[in-house]
Image (cartoon, rainbow, N blue to C red):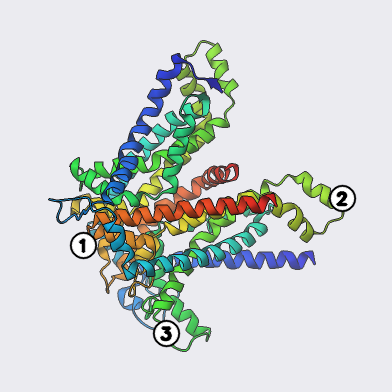
Amino acid sequence: MRRIGNAAKVVVLGVWLLITLFPLYWIVVTSLKPKPEIFSMPLRYWPGNVTFEHYEELFSFADFGAYLLNSLLVSLVAAGVVTAIGVLGGYTLARFAFPGRGALMLAFLVTQMIPLFIALGPLYLLMSDLDLLNRLAGLMLVYVAMLVPFSTIIMRGFYERVPVALEEAAQVDGASRLVAMVRVVIPVMLPGIAATFIFAFVQCWNELFLAITFIDSEDAKTIPVAMNSFITQYDIDWGSMAAATVISVLPTLVLFAAIRRYIVEGLTAGAVKG
Amino acid sequence: MRLFTARRARFIALCLLPGVVFVTLFTYYPMIRGTIIAFQRYNLFDITSTPFVGLENFRAVLSEERFWTALRNTGTWVVVSLFFQFFLGFGLALLLRRHFRGRGLYQAWVFFPWAMSGFLIGLLWRWMFNGQFGVINDLLLKTGLIDQRIGFLATPGWAMTSVIVANIWYGVTFFAIMIMAALQSVPKELYEAADVDGASRLRQFWHVTLPHIRPTLALIVLLRIIWILNFPDLIYSMTGGGPAGSTDIITTFLIQQVIGGDYGRAGAVGLLILGLLLSFSVFYLNATRFEKSR
């Protein structure tokens, strides 16, 4: 009985793994097929003649390298600022009781429940007033604002797992609060900090609606904006699109695999504790 | 936890200041401005006069057939996606509950859709559901389930089914992992006690596991309802709300208003969504609390 149960379990888990991975496999295969093979019947389930022409096309015709750099710059800077703000804010929220703390937590949590694009129009007006349309700096500012609540809340959670006694000991030894924080607490939290940074990076890397609202000029496009402009109503160059998908998903896959444990921990802890 | 004293006020303020400034300026300020705009005539292409028009924008939105279609579609989109994500996720969570060799690796692999953006997922499935060269048509033909290709994304009924299938694919694993965490929060002693009493696996599940994780499940479900409703990304790149508005949900409808430049109406739709979510959440929380205390 138990053996049958185990076999069934393996089969079910295997089938789900297959269902999960097949779309990824399919997009990789598509990106490696020469154009006639993509649009010919019968479908080939593995590429007969592997070609990198779609990748080359992206970089020679579409200036994909520039979009990559834009995305990289925006995501790195925004994620760095978001993480730094989270490290500071999370510390005070975890370690001090002060008037308005509950209200602040609530104000941050509410922004997580309400999607930012309800404010999409007014944000456009604000960006236009500040002369930040079509600028990577404008995008960075909005991304930071979008992710600060998350980074602060999750950092607070990580701080709460570090015993207060640890930094108190350092303070007894004569270190100031700031020194105690930098020397004693931060090192213990490094994995959590790295996870927050990567999560923020991936969010910025993937973000679409804010970017297509604010960015229109060729030299400020990020990858999602560029890919969005590849889409026309009836015709998509699927070879190039598949290649662009593979390129844009590769870094996030690697990074996400690295921090999956922390993200799951952070999110589920938040949900379970309510 | 240390108490608040005047000496520490400056340190606290300095640490919190950057975050508060960002969120106030780029989240709360635009939200408040959007609320005000909802009661103005505010079209991006003519902002020389933006008079207050009372409930005019709401009236205009509510009298639009497309709004009501989007609202009905939102119901289908949320309920069907949630149903499958929940039950498939629950099943997966039960299978993953006990430790086995390679579990971590398995989780890492099945978790990967969650690293993708909704936009990319939409593209991926748009390609697979392609009416002519799509692999799904090919597989269905090969297995003999259909005898001619289906224009999945070009046929109104099929289009909604297709976006929901993609959404289920995306959401199951995350649901599974949340539920798995909830399952692991059940104290082991409870099962030991149940074992001593000779309760079967099924009875243990029904009388120990379920009651214990019910509050968590209720919360996860609420969060996911809000989240699925607010997830236009996948639909945006997969069908763009088409054909003929058959995959429009309320949030893609909102985005169309923004792209169309009518910020007054967009504000009105935003407030309607907010009102809908808030009243639903209050109703839902009351209902689940009632359920718990019974």
Q: Chain of mark 2?
A: B
- Residue lying at the far front in this picture: please name it: B54
Which image quarter is the C terminus of chain A in? top right
Foreground mark, 3 or 1, reads 3
Residue under label 2: B196
- B207 vs A257, left or right, is right
Q: Amino acid at mark 1?
A: Phe
The residue at 53%/35% (across/down) is A157
The residue at 35%/64% (across/down) is B236
**Secondary element type, mark 1:** helix
Which image quarter is the N terminus of chain A in? bottom right
Work out how far the residue at label 2 is from the one at label 3, CA to CA, in angstroms. 58 Å
Residue A61: numbered disc = 1
Where residue A73 sits in the image (x, y, percent)? 29, 43
Where residue A3 sits in the image (x, y, percent)? 77, 65
**Secondary element type, mark 2:** helix
Foreground mark, 2 or 3, reads 2
Mark 1: few/some/many CA within 10 Å (<14, 14-19, 20+):
few
Work out how far the residue at label 3 is from the one at label 1, CA to CA, in angstroms. 34 Å
